[in-house]
Amino acid sequence: MTVKIESAMVMAAGIGKRMRPLTATRPKPLVRVAGKALIDHSLDRIAAAGVEHVVVNVHYLADALEAHLGGQAWPFSIAISDERGQLLETGGGMVKALPQLTGDPILIVNSDNIWTDGPEDSIQHLARHWDGERMDALLLVIRQASATGHGGKGDFHMDPNGQLSRRKPGRVAPFVYTGIQLISPRLLDGAPEGAFSTNILWDRAIAAGRLYGVSHMGQWFDVGTPAAIAPTEAALAGG
């Protein structure tokens, strides 16, 4: 059974240091890739999945990002979670935005990656595998060999049931997190105050046996630096 996703959060508050000098005058989500702003790639996929409400967090050059979001007609309602006063990182950002988000599970998407669908819509692929009885979070992961533009040694191991565990120090893990996940609001129960990483929540879920993954069947591009833009555009143009 495919669960209905009522709302989504797009993580867009980062400073974009790795994307300099392109982020000297614009926030990273507004860097253009393949003819449109990075964040619009994510928002278009969220719209295609039928999500009704989206919250975007803002910090660096927030006025420009708000103007961009407000200047377009979206098929969902859109709200801002303002982090101008303090950048809260990924975990703290979710905690601050939670009062504006509805439903269970909630979709969380990073604004600095681009993906294409495989045999089915990738967000609906996640929704079809969601099991709130067993899961506090369900991450869309991709095999490291297929993670275009991504460096590193991988993030997770995944067992045959989809349960995730961390890469061991000094080892390589086969799966990379795509920046797309479903979470239950209970993942945030008892969360730290202020700025903190989602990794804290994931580690707690791993310890409880409640962090799961599902493998992405389409293409995925980590567009974190200026050098990643041209190869991403070439791959997208080639289908």
Image: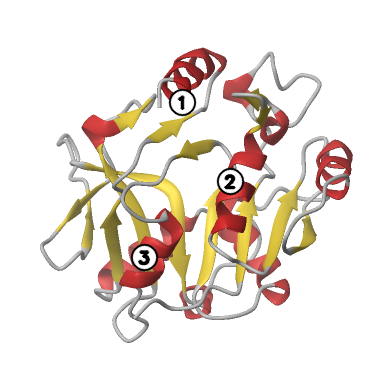
Distance from the alpha carbon under mark 1 to that under mark 2:
15 Å
Residue matched to label 1:
236
Judge the density around disc 2: few (<14), some (14-19), many (≥20) Cα neighbours within 10 Å: many
Secondary element type, mark 1? helix
Residue 206 occupies which quadrant of the picture? bottom left
**Of the residues under marks 3 and 2, which one precedes in the sequence?**
2
**Of the residues under marks 1 and 2, which one precedes in the sequence?**
2
Task: Name the side, left or right, on which 238 lies relative to 45.
Answer: left
Residue drawn at (50%, 77%), measured in percent from left and top?
A: 4
Indicate whether 35 appears above or below 185. above
Judge the density around disc 1: few (<14), some (14-19), many (≥20) Cα neighbours within 10 Å: some
Task: Name the side, left or right, on which 118 lies relative to 223.
Answer: left
Residue matched to label 2:
42
Residue drawn at (40%, 69%), measured in percent from left and top?
A: 127
Judge the density around disc 3: few (<14), some (14-19), many (≥20) Cα neighbours within 10 Å: many
Distance from the alpha carbon under mark 1 to that under mark 3:
26 Å
Residue drawn at (81%, 40%), measured in percent from left and top?
A: 65
Indicate whether 79 appears above or below 150. below
